[in-house]
Image (cartoon, rainbow, N blue to C red):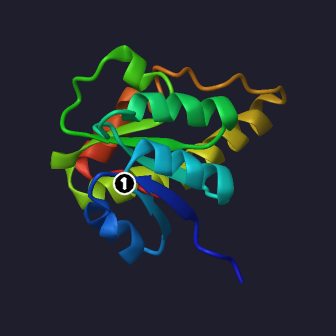
Amino acid sequence: MATNPTLLCINRDPAQLRSLQENGYQLLTATTGHDGLRLFASQPVDAIVLDYHLGLLDGAVVANEIKRLRPTIPIVMVADDLELPYDALRSIDALVTKSDGAHFLWATVHFVLNVKPAQSREAKLQSGTRLSPVPKNEPFSAREWKDIRAGTIRF
């Protein structure tokens, strides 16, 4: 029996992420960057959902540290808007705004855990060579973002 993926949710208000649990994900929650990094070091997780605005240790710093320790783990950052400094974006795999809503967040988490790895495996099989890492500034193609935002992406 397969277990549901476990998400580490580092968010000032973890109740905002309840829809992820309702859609089958196991959640570990922390409300500060320090607590989130401690949980990350002590618990196995499949992905991170990270609030940008965490206070003293902001989401960008937390994301950079997580990627330093485990470069392949998917990180979805949640922010008030899409206008963030470049440094905040370099270690994340996807960005969701709070106004995008719970369904968009779920779709993005599902995508980084299931669709993106499958696409990478398929591309590797087709090319017969090793894949280079996905560029940090392009976690999704423009078409994928358009489909996600429009709600027409298929999993």
In the picture, measured across the screen, residue 6 lies left or right of residue 146, that is right
Relative to residue 110, is residue 72 depicted above or below? above
Which residue extends farthest left?
Answer: 99
Which residue extends farthest bottom?
Answer: 1
Badge count? 1
Q: Amino acid at mark 1?
A: Thr
Nearer the observer, 72 or 116:
72
- Indicate the quadrant containing the N terminus: top left, top right, bottom left or bottom right: bottom right
Name the secondary structure under disc 1: loop
x%, y% of residue 53? 28, 37
In the picture, measured across the screen, residue 44 lies left or right of residue 109, that is right
Nearer the observer, 33 or 147:
33
Relative to residue 86, is residue 44 depicted above or below? below
In the image, what residue occupies the spot 65% across and 76% down?
Answer: 3
Residue 115 visible to the viewer: no
Q: Which residue is label 1 attached to? A: 31
